[in-house]
Amino acid sequence: MSLLALLMGMAALSTGAPAAPPADHLTPRSNYLERCGGCHGVQGRAFAPTVPDLRDRAGWFLCDATGRDYVARLPNIVFSHLTDADLAGMLNYVAFDLGGTSAPKGAKRYTAAEVAVSRREPLSTTDLESYRTQVVKTLIARCGAPEALASDYAPKLGPKESASR
């Protein structure tokens, strides 16, 4: 805990006001929860059938440049109001913490410099689901990601919706 946070907490106790940490002390997990958890779930398990689960899966995207690039250039990532360093921390939380054992041994962590470069070239495809499917097929073929990843990252539509496609 920083001295500033400690002093703020002590001041709050003496005044009865709630202590709030400075904004720059948000953790990668809290950044994820605030910005991504609503769709991808608190534990990385999505609620909507068309939103991919991240739990025990997200790390696979670090196994090659295609997957790594895909994640770092997603519109909700590149247009985030987080600093490059905070965004890199959040991406690492998703890949290594939520991703669990899916992160390949020796996978390198995102850096602030890498995030800064990615932000200059956001994905411009109009069909992210199709592009994600292509990326996942590449991860399976090149990296040995499990075949189940293809169905995990495919939209999960009900019988009526599937028939109308």
Image (spheres, grey):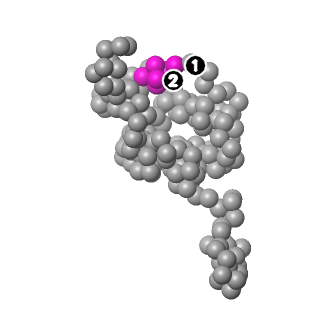
Q: Which residue is mark 2?
A: 128
Q: Secondary structure at mark 1?
A: loop
Q: Quadrant of residue 122?
A: top right
Which residue extends farthest bottom? 14
56 is within the stretch colored magenta: no
Give the amino acid at mark 2: Leu
132 is within the stretch colored magenta: yes
Tell me the quarter of the image containing the N terminus. Answer: bottom right
Horizontal side of 165 relative to 73 (left or right) equals left
Q: Position of residue 25 (x, y in %)?
A: 65, 62
| 117 to 19, vertically: above or below | above
User: Does the image show residue 133?
Assistant: yes
Horizontal side of 164 relative to 108 (left or right) equals left
Q: Which residues are magenta?
A: 127-133
Give the amino acid at mark 1: Thr
Tell me the quarter of the image containing the C terminus. Answer: top left
Is there CB contact under 8 Å for labels 2 and 1?
yes
Residue at figure coordinates x 34%, y 32% from the top left? 152
Q: Position of residue 51 (x, y in %)?
A: 43, 34
Residue at figure coordinates x 66%, y 81% from the top left? 16
| 24 to 75, vertically: above or below | below
Please, what is the dominant secondary structure of the magenta stretch?
helix
Q: Position of residue 146 (x, y in %)?
A: 31, 32
Residue at figure coordinates x 67%, y 77% from the top left? 17
Give the distance between the C-alpha atoms of the residues marked 2 and 1, in whole angstroms: 6 Å
Mark carried by residue 152: none
Which residue extends farthest front? 160
Q: Which residue is mark 1?
A: 125
Q: Secondary structure at mark 2?
A: helix
Q: Position of residue 163 (x, y in %)?
A: 31, 14
Q: Residues within 10 Å of mark 2 (few under 14, many from 20)?
A: some
